Image: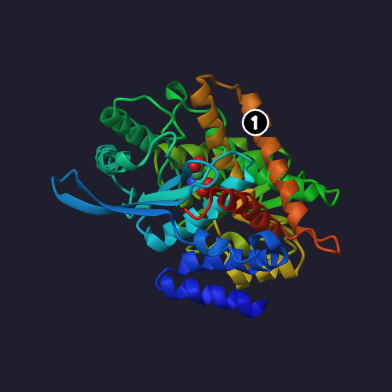
Amino acid sequence: MKSKIKKFIDLVKERNQFEPEFLQAVEEVAETVIPYIASQKIYNGKNILLRMVEPERVIMFRVPWIDDKGEIVVNRGYRIEMNSAIGPYKGGLRFHPTVNLSILKFLAFEQVFKNALTTLPMGGGKGGSDFDPKGKSDGEIMRFCQSFMSELFRHIGPNTDVPAGDVGVGGREIGYLFGMYKKLRNEFTGVLTGKGMSWGGSLIRPEATGYGTVYFAQNMLETRGDSIEGKTVTVSGSGNVAQYACEKATQLGAKVVTLSDSSGFIYDEEGINADKLAYVMELKNEKRGRINEYVKKYPKAKFFKDEKPWGIKCDVALPCAIQNEINSDDAKTLLDNGCYVVSEGANMPSTIDAAHTFLAAKILYAPGKAANAGGVATSGLEMSQNSLRITWTREEVDEKLKNIMSDIHASCIKYGKRDDGYIDYVTGANISGFVKVADAMLAQGVV
Ligand code: GLU
């Protein structure tokens, strides 16, 4: 079996030589799914995984715009339309200077499995740009978004491809993108999700990824007769996902002691309660400031420059920042300090070695494609509300989100429970997502 997996990975490597993040995402799926394919006759000889690692379409385009000094800037725009077997392409847009083909292909590949897990009819895609929103004026952000959409609009649509936010793309950017799409197409449709409430957005969409990650942690703890109440929680990141993970964990009685950004992390031993979180939200969302300002406001807290929060003792870790933020040393430190629950709010925050370390220690470990699927799931609910032209209440959407997270949890158990009772959520999520997409691909022929 090992040589079969290696042969497959070598082939993908040869064809995608300069794409380390994409190869990492493929490897993690291949090592769990290939043994399953071998055990199931219907998938034998169909090269399904080989078809899945090849995007259906990759769009790359020039994004020229004019900055506040009147200079012409050129960025690169992308949309990876990865797989549409079970629904229109769906997935976020990332604006960050590190964005390249490898990062977006890894995210699009993960998205295919994640979206399949949500139980909703959504294919997988991802896009974005190497544009850096940091320090840009509102006018610059708007002009960039308009230029980006002036090309993207011809490739997307409510039944074709429905983008949303990701790192660097929030409500403000979705607004500018939507405005330009509407102008160019002369159509008001649910072509993007994460929209504002007065123009087609869904309640709970901003909260959904962070809330879902905590609901999933709670589901995992329940399998051991435990709960998140009273637990000490470390969270990385301080953007949309981290903020609402912090909020929900606190509401459920846990104590969140860290948040971070690219400048370092803050440690507040007393816990980041609702008032402190409101300050962080204002700091990050309105003022667009840095996390170290937290310690000026709350001097009992400490700031650790250029460090990650994984050395702080905790029961539960919620990585909500970025890919590969937990390496194998970080994973060992977390385990040594007694951490026994890791629920990933970010996409692929653990390296392959870190993930193996968690699994070997048999802790409750949920990969992002299961634990952070609440965001895209609620985007799916936004699409349904747009199609029906109705608005569900906060309570209705939250209830649906909770149910989706526990359905994802159940399907991870279905495919990931080992003979000794340990639940391998990585294997469970990968196989469950694979089966749904693979069965649709088989039914639709070689296309
Ligand atoms: N970017 C988010 C994710 O990684 C959300 C995507 C969406 O809502 O389409 O799943």
**Which residue is painted at 62% across and 76% down in the image?**
4
Task: Locate residue 287, reporting x and y percent.
Answer: 39, 39
Q: Is residue 75 left or right of residue 225?
A: left
**Left or right of 131: which side holds 203?**
right
The crowd level at tag 1 (other Cα within 10 Å; few <14, some 14-19, many 20+) is many
From this view, report whether residue 365 is shown above or below residue 139. Answer: below
Which residue shows up at 58% across the image and 63% down it? 46
**What's the residue at 72%, 61% (across, down)?**
339
Furthest toward the bottom, the residue is: 3
Q: Quadrant of residue 416?
A: bottom right
- Residue 16 placement (x, y as % from top left): 42, 70
Residue type of the residue flagged with mark 1: Asp
Outermost residue on the left side: it is: 70
User: Element type at marker 1?
Assistant: helix
Left or right: 356 in relation to 260: right
The answer to whether 229 is drawn above or below residue 399 in the figure is: below
Q: Position of residue 202 (x, y in %)?
A: 52, 28
Q: Is residue 76 visible?
A: yes
